[in-house]
Amino acid sequence: MSTAEVKPAKMPSQSRSELSVFDRFADLVGRMTSRAAFFVFCVLLVLLWAPSYFIFGSVDTWQLIINTVTTIVTFLLVALLQNTQKRSDDAVQQKLNAIAQGLADMMGRTSAGEQRELAEDRKELLKAVGLEDREGS
């Protein structure tokens, strides 16, 4: 791939700055669940739940309720936290692409024509820009 074929990096200033309602909600949940207070709340909830066995009287009912509730809450939290993590990863990748693009441009303006090794390094940097869009998992 020649350097002319490389798509320029999307600069962080070109990113949309407004988050959707879902993204804002996911951020709020991520901030809340990453605090010690949320962990303490979860521990207290489990400690309060344990004696509820005597209210239900049946181990099967007691286990079914706790298992169902924790499974649903876990499923929803994973979905919300995955959204937050993906957006964070995308932002970091944009920054890396912008740095690589800027460095390659700077190398091209300085002495890339004079030093063959520098010119090769510049080509490799340009190939790396946007690599995340071209590589499969």
Image (cartoon, rainbow, N blue to C red):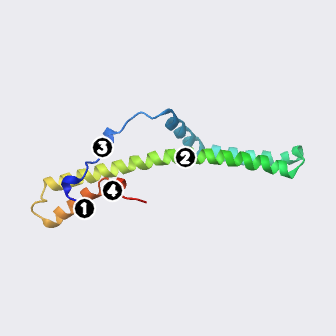
- Marks 2 and 1: in contact by CB < 8 Å? no
Quarter of the image that includes the C terminus: bottom left
Q: Which residue is mark 3?
A: 11
Residue furthest toward the left?
114
Decide: few, some or many residues near mark 1? Use Cα within 10 Å; few <14, some 14-19, many ≥20.
some
Q: Position of residue 117 (x, y in %)?
A: 17, 67
User: Which of the two labelled residues, at mark 1 and mark 2, occupies the earlier sequence position?
Assistant: 2
Residue 124: which numbered mark, if any?
1
User: Which of the two labelled residues, at mark 3 and mark 1, occupies the earlier sequence position?
Assistant: 3
- Please name the amino acid that badge 1 sits on: Glu
- Marks 1 and 3: in contact by CB < 8 Å? no
Marks 1 and 2 sit apart, C-alpha to C-alpha, by 34 Å
Q: Position of residue 90 (x, y in %)?
A: 41, 48
Q: Position of residue 92 (x, y in %)?
A: 39, 49
User: Which of the two labelled residues, at mark 1 and mark 4, occupies the earlier sequence position?
Assistant: 1
- Marks 4 and 1: in contact by CB < 8 Å? no
Helix, strand or loop status at disc 1: helix
Q: Position of residue 19 (x, y in %)?
A: 45, 35
Q: Quadrant of residue 3?
A: bottom left
Above/below status of 125 relative to 50: below
Q: Which residue is mark 4?
A: 131
Helix, strand or loop status at disc 2: helix
- Please name the amino acid that badge 3 sits on: Met
Q: Residue at x 43, y 50 (%)?
A: 89
